[in-house]
Image: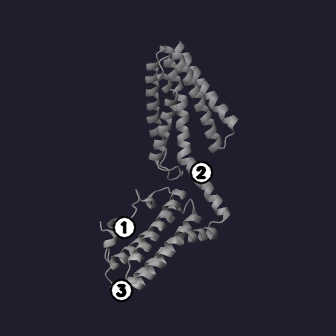
Amino acid sequence: MKRFSDLTEQEVLALAITNEEEDSRIYRGFAEGLRQQFPASAKVFDEMAEEEVHHRTMLYDLYRRKFGEYLPLIRRQDVQGFLRPKQPLWLMRPLGLEEVRKFAENMEFEAERYYRKAAANARDASVRKLLIELAEAEAGHESLAHRLSQEILTSGARAKEDETARRMFVLQYVQPGLVGLMDGSVSTLAPLFAAAFATHDTWATFLVGLAASVGAGISMGFAEALSDDGSLTGRGAPLLRGTVCGLMTAIGGLGHTVPYLIPHFYTATSVSVGVVAAELAAISWIRTRFMDTPFLQAAFQVVVGGVLVFLAGIFIGSS
């Protein structure tokens, strides 16, 4: 990679042209990714993409006057100092609105920094003048985005998009996580306490709980990932949902399994029962917070199911 200080004035302009073209296409990608769920925000990014096209035209006109038709290929990855995204966010689906906005802010900050540094090193007055103008324009993109947001993202549109974002978060993360947590917290109670009261051996009980938790996590993860591809339901990538569901299932089971590392049986059982109560309370709170279920109703439903499974495990283990 070349150092910025080693770039010629021709390469500085060529790189700026490439950057503006790439940025406009990234904004287009954001707009397309947001259009179905967030049409108002998609329109904002369409406008910002047009602004980047205008900047490229200004740069290219100056470049042709100074250096002719040949435009050397030089990109961000060819020069030291540019931020390199870990993944092409503009190609990801579904797109998260806040993540996209943060990414765009970083893009504008980097562009402004580049133009100011290039202007400081420019010897040609017309080149320096244009670079300073573009630096100011990039700095003003925050106000442009704000202005566009005021014009396009009305209070009603913003409220609608915020509700859509909340619903997508619930579908893609909360729902599979909650299903996993409920399954792990409740379904592993019977084998764990059956083993506990059948053997009174804390280590053997721990191994049974560990096996039940890991097995349930793998099973629920695959079941969630294979349930649908998310294209019609909007529930997100199957791999992500399966991972969230599987991990939460395992965590739900391990919560009341770990206390059986305590060698004293009745102490371990008492701690485990306390963890179960905390898990059921957490599940009830999540259902109230994200699923709009009244807390008492959610607690009653969860506690009744948990107690029945818990008693079944004790009854089977004691028989």
Q: Quadrant of residue 84?
A: bottom left
What type is the residue that disc 2 sits on? Arg
Give the x, y percent position of residue 47. 54, 72
Q: Residues within 10 Å of mark 2 (few under 14, many from 20)?
A: some
Q: First in sequence: mark 1 or mark 2?
A: 1
Q: In the image, is residue 140 above or below residue 41? A: below
Give above or below for 202 relative to 78.
above
Q: Which residue is mark 2?
A: 167
The residue sitting at 37% across, 87% down in the picture is 65
- Amino acid at dot 3: Lys
The residues bearing labels 3 and 1 have C-alpha atoms spaced at a distance of 22 Å
Q: Amino acid at mark 1?
A: Arg
Crowd class of label 3 (few under 14; some 14 to 19; many from 20; radius 10 Å): some
Q: CA distance from mark 1 to mark 2?
A: 37 Å
Instruction: Say which residue appears at 65% left-offset and 66% top-offset.
Output: 154
**Residue 317: x percent and y percent?**
52, 16
The image quadrant that residue 283 belongs to is: top right
Of callouts 2 and 3, the N-terminal one: 3
- Choose between 187 and 100: the one closer to the eye: 100
Q: Secondary structure at mark 3?
A: helix
SS state under label 2: helix
Mark yes or no: residue 33 visible.
Answer: yes
First of labels 3, 1 by sequence position: 3
Measuring from the top left, give residue 260's x and y in whole percent.
Answer: 48, 22
Q: In front: 5, or 29?
A: 5
Q: Nearer the viewer, residue 16 or 158?
A: 16
- Which residue is disc 1 drawn over? 76
Q: Which residue is mark 3?
A: 66
- Which residue is situated farthest in the top direction here? 319
Question: Alpha-carbon distance for marks 2 and 3?
Answer: 53 Å
> How many numbered marks have been drawn onto this rendered protein structure?
3
